[in-house]
Amino acid sequence: MTYIEFLIEELLSFFKHEEEIYTRILKMSPPGSLSIDRSRKKPRWIHRIPAGKDVHGHNRYHRRTISDDSDLLRQLADKEYARVALNIIDHDLRILSRIPKQLLPYSQEAILTGMHSAYQSLAGSCFRIVRQAQGVFHRQREWAMEPYEQSDYRPEEKIHTTTRGLNVRSRAELLIAEMLYKFDIPFRYEQVIWIGRYKMAPDFTFLDRDGNEFYWEYCGMMSLPEYRDRQIWRRRTYENAGITEWENMIYTYDATDRIDMREIEAIIRTKILPRI
């Protein structure tokens, strides 16, 4: 199985799992649908329940106003959300299931066969460069998947789960992890490193192309004095061990755990991708 085929299998598995969830929601939902009457000053939500067909074969509905029934409104809104989600999932599943049949074989032999004969004997250098890059990527992926000591500090705070099943502490870390997935960057979360007698765990650890680790700390609550003091101590501890912002550490600071995904993407593009 090629890596592209592996990714397609992962997507198929994800969508089928989502399909099961939304199908279950639909089965548990109340009958009927919503419409809204905007003819008055205050809009009214109307619950439409199918009531068979009239003598001409047209659909009939029982209608009643439910503007004050917040629970039923929420259930019907969830039902419509699930219906639309299932339509999208069905569309994407049909497309994904066709992709493997349309893929061209990707191998050295297939590439060379597609080249004009005048170039075939000269393509060795490009092949070696690509293989070196692939070797680095596979080494980084294997490194990320190897067992490692992860911080056991307050595990109950890891309440956010990424699409790949990783539990993290904050919504900001969740979004960063998802952006790293998007760029296909292998990483370790809260890997323990020892600095003297101190047990440290940077938020994200990466492996550069030379096999050296570098780190990313997201400091999202700098408006809190106790948190800020701890981050100052952590930074000083890192720097005493040669882990510095200008060498092998990336810092992101915020006051209230807000996150700008444009900034996160810029950091990934300028400070991480060039090193891996």
Image (spheres, rainbow, N blue to C red):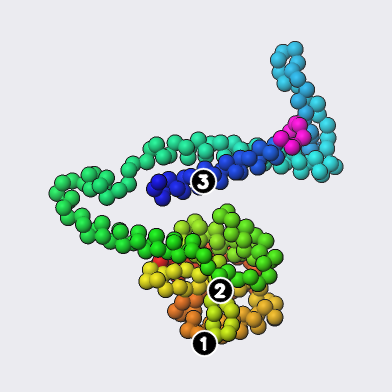
The quadrant the C terminus occupies is bottom left
Q: Residue at x 55, y 70 (%)?
A: 149
- Residue hosting label 1: 240
Q: Secondary structure at mark 2?
A: loop
The residue closer to the viewer here, 60 or 162, is 162
Asked whether residue 158 is drawn in magenta, I would say no
Is any part of residue 252 visible from this angle?
no
Q: Secondary structure at mark 3?
A: helix
- Residue hosting label 2: 192
- Amino acid of disc 2: Val
Q: Are marks 2 and 3 in contact (CB under 8 Å)?
A: no
Spot the residue most to the left. Answer: 118
The residue closer to the viewer here, 196 or 53, is 196
Q: Residue at x 65, y 83 (%)?
A: 229
Q: Residue at x 62, y 57 (%)?
A: 161
Residue 66 position in % (x across, y down): 83, 37
- Amino acid of disc 3: Leu
Q: Which of pointers 1 and 2 indicates the residue nearer the eye? A: 2
Q: Earlier in the sequence, mark 2 or mark 3?
A: 3
Q: Earlier in the sequence, mark 1 or mark 2?
A: 2
Q: Earlier in the sequence, mark 1 or mark 3?
A: 3
Mark 3 is surrounded, within 10 Å at the Cα level, by few (under 14), some (14 to 19) or many (20 or more) other residues, namely some
Residue 151 position in % (x across, y down): 60, 71
Q: CA distance from mark 1 to mark 3?
A: 44 Å
Compared across the picture, whether 110 is left or right of 134 comes to left
Q: Which of pointers 2 and 3 indicates the residue nearer the eye? A: 2
The magenta stretch is 27-34
- Residue hosting label 3: 11
- Location of residue 124 by image quarter: bottom left
Spot the residue most to the right. Answer: 68
Q: Residue at x 66, y 64 (%)?
A: 158
